[in-house]
Image (cartoon, rainbow, N blue to C red):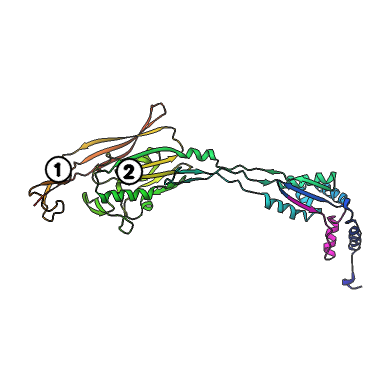
């Protein structure tokens, strides 16, 4: 007899058995009906007869007792469990289509926990809005297969609540509420500035207003404010260049960087990059100024903590303010400026204002006006002082040593 006509005795026996089992599928007591529920969600599994597509499939169906009566399936599952199988693999041996139902349960019910989120907008009240955290849902898959197995031992028709666990969110409302503490507030005066300089200060403040420094992140003042150009809205005002006060686009922006710098110091943020002016500032103590320009000089502030800090920056027309919010510090920080050397104040240069740059037409001849002031050379140190909640000094830290150049002031004389 040719090879194609050979059929094993086991295959014949198996096909006969499968055909016989086909009659049993109409017996409701021999097939499983499983209803899984959680909340309003209901999932149904009915054990159905599987028609083999060929003799190899039929043989596997027979070996796995897929079309066998429920009692026979449970006996095979019990044996596999004794041999060390987990509940899922043991159950799917006899109930392969059950996985589709369980996978549907997992897809429908599983949900990742949602952290509480904090949103910051200093232009509205309240500045902070905080969403509630939400626990997740995770179906205990192997536990579910186990529950199904033991329930089927008791009855072929079962109803089971899906076992779950609820993973908790990593960030809670409580975690975010502590970030709304005012860690530091600092201000500088610009009430005597020109309108152009006031404009530049207000514009720069608006560009850092609302900035957030995440945990481990660094803020660049130049990147945040942008280039000081007319296209970016900045006007011409006095700047320090080459050790002198000269007209320049963006004059006054250094007062904003200085205000931010001091607020950052008092907030215990890490200063990555800061530079002094060549001349002593008129609006800040020595060793506590922060000179910036669009090219070579930047102010960089790092938040070395794990949670973010939030920056509010604004003006009232005469003062620049920076407030920094975040988790409360366990100590208070104060500043100390120490001048270690002061040179002689240089004499003033005098110039007759023939072009009437500083005087109006009709001003009495010989009228004198100080355009800029003479400043001596100054050497200084900057310190931070750390106090506990009872006012006890914990530490004094030297953070800077600076040298400011002398500068001659200018007196204009009306022609």
For label 1, the residue is 346
Q: Give the range drawn in magenta.
A: 42-69
Q: Name the residue at 36% across, 54% down.
A: 226
Q: Name the residue at 17% across, 43% down.
A: 374
Q: Is residue 75 magenta?
A: no
- Front position among marks 2 and 1: 2
Q: Nearer the viewer, residue 315 or 28?
A: 315
Say left or right for 163 vs 401: right
In space, the residues marked 2 and 1 are separated at their CA atoms by 35 Å
In the displayed structure, would residue 275 be above or below residue 384?
below
Q: Position of residue 179 (x, y in %)?
A: 47, 40
Q: Position of residue 398 (x, y in %)?
A: 33, 36
* Element on which disc 1 rests: loop
* Element on which disc 2 rests: loop
Tag shown at residue 170? none
Disc 1 residue crowd, few under 14, some 14–19, many 20+, Cα 10 Å: some
Q: Is residue 64 magenta?
A: yes
Can residue 47 be seen here? yes
For label 2, the residue is 316
Can residue 146 be seen here? no
């Amino acid at each position: 007899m040719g090879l194609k006509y050979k059929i094993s005795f086991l295959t014949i026996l198996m096909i006969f058995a499968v055909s016989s089992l086909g009659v049993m599928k109409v017996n409701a007591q021999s097939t499983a009906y499983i209803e899984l529920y959680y909340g309003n969600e209901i999932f149904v599994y009915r054990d159905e007869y599987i028609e083999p597509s060929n003799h190899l499939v039929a043989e596997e169906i027979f070996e796995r007792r897929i079309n066998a009566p429920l009692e026979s399936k449970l006996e095979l599952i019990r044996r596999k469990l004794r041999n060390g199988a987990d509940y899922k693999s043991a159950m799917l041996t006899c109930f392969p289509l059950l996985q589709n139902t369980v996978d549907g349960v997992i897809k429908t019910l599983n949900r990742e926990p949602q952290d509480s989120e904090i949103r910051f907008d200093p232009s509205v009240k309240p500045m902070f809005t905080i969403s509630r955290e939400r626990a997740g849902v995770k179906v205990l898959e192997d536990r579910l297969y186990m529950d199904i197995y033991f329930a089927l031992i008791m009855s072929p028709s079962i109803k089971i609540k899906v076992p779950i666990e609820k993973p908790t969110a990593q960030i809670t409302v409580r975690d975010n509420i502590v970030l709304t503490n005012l860690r530091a507030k600092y201000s500088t005066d610009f009430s005597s500035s020109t309108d152009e300089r006031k404009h530049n200060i207000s514009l720069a403040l608006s560009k850092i207003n609302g900035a957030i420094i995440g945990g481990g992140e660094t803020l660049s003042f130049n990147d945040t404010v942008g280039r000081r150009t007319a296209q970016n809205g900045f006007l011409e005002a006095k700047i320090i260049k080459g050790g002198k006060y000269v007209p320049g686009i963006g004059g006054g922006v250094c007062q904003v960087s200085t205000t931010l710098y001091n607020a950052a110091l008092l907030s215990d943020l890490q200063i990555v990059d800061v530079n002094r002016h060549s001349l002593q500032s008129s609006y800040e103590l020595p060793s506590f100024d922060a000179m910036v320009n669009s090219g070579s000089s930047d102010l960089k502030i790092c938040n070395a903590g794990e949670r973010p800090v939030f920056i509010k920056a604004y003006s009232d027309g005469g003062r620049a303010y920076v407030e920094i919010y975040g988790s409360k510090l366990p100590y208070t920080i104060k500043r100390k400026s120490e001048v270690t050397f002061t040179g002689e104040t240089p004499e003033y240069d005098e110039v007759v204002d023939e072009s009437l740059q500083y005087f109006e037409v009709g001003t009495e001849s010989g009228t004198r006006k100080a355009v800029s002031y003479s400043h001596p050379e100054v050497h200084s140190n900057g310190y931070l002082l750390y106090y506990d909640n009872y006012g006890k000094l914990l530490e004094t830290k030297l953070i800077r040593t600076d040298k400011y150049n002398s500068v001659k002031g200018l007196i204009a004389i009306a022609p």
